[in-house]
Image (cartoon, helix red, strand yellow):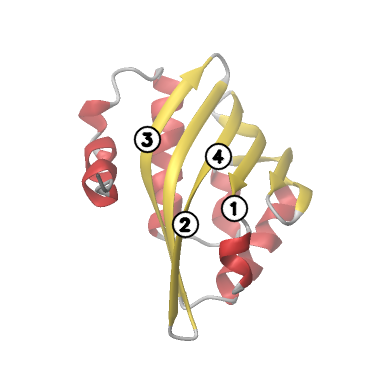
Amino acid sequence: MELDLKAAALKYADPKNRHDLSEEKQDFLRRFESFWSDPSGPRVRELFKPDAQVNFAGQGTVSGEEYVGLMDAILADADSVQVDVVDYAERGDRLFIFWHAKRIAGGKEISWHGVDRFRIENGMAVEEQVIFDTQVLSGD
C-alpha cells in the first residue's frame, strides 16, 4: 500500500488535529510550517536560538546563527524547495517532525523523507538533529 503523503500532510496541517501536543510544541510546529511556506536564511531566526546546535545531515554541526547562511546556500542552489509535515510526536522537551520534501533544481525534481528532532526551550529550538538519506541529494 502506497502512503498518500499529501493527504497525511493535510491531516496534520489542520491545527484541530494537534490536541496531543503541548501549546509550546503546537506553536513551534505552526512556525515550522510557516517557515517552509516561504523559507529564507533570515527566517531561521524565527525557530532557532543563535547558539542552538544544529546537526544537519551532510553538513556537520552548525550554530543557529550559522544555519542562516547554510539555509541561504541550500535555497540558492534550487529553483524551489517544499517541505510538508507528515507526522509529529512530542516527548518532554523534544519535538519530532516527520516530513516529506521536494526540491526542483535545473529542471530535475527529487523528493525524500526525513525526521527533525528538536529540543525546545521557551518556544525556540536549542538543538536539532536532521535525519534523512543524503544519497538522494547527491544526484547519484
Instruction: Report the residue marked by disc 4.
Output: 116
**Label 2 vs label 3: CA separation?**
14 Å
**Label 4 vs label 2: CA separation?**
13 Å
Earlier-in-chain disc, 1 versus 3: 3
Q: Residues within 10 Å of mark 3 (few under 14, many from 20)?
A: some
Residue 1 against residue 28 in the figure, above or below:
below
Position of the N terminus, as image quadrant, is top left
The location of residue 15, given as percent across then percent down, is 26, 32
Q: Which of labels 4 and 1 is toward the front?
A: 1
Instruction: Report the residue marked by disc 3.
Output: 87
Earlier-in-chain disc, 1 versus 2: 2
Q: Are marks 4 and 2 in contact (CB under 8 Å)?
A: no
Q: Which of labels 1 and 3 is toward the front?
A: 1
Earlier-in-chain disc, 2 versus 3: 3
Q: Which of labels 2 and 3 is toward the front?
A: 2
The image quadrant of residue 88 is top left
Q: Are marks 1 and 2 in contact (CB under 8 Å)?
A: yes
Q: Are marks 4 and 1 in contact (CB under 8 Å)?
A: no
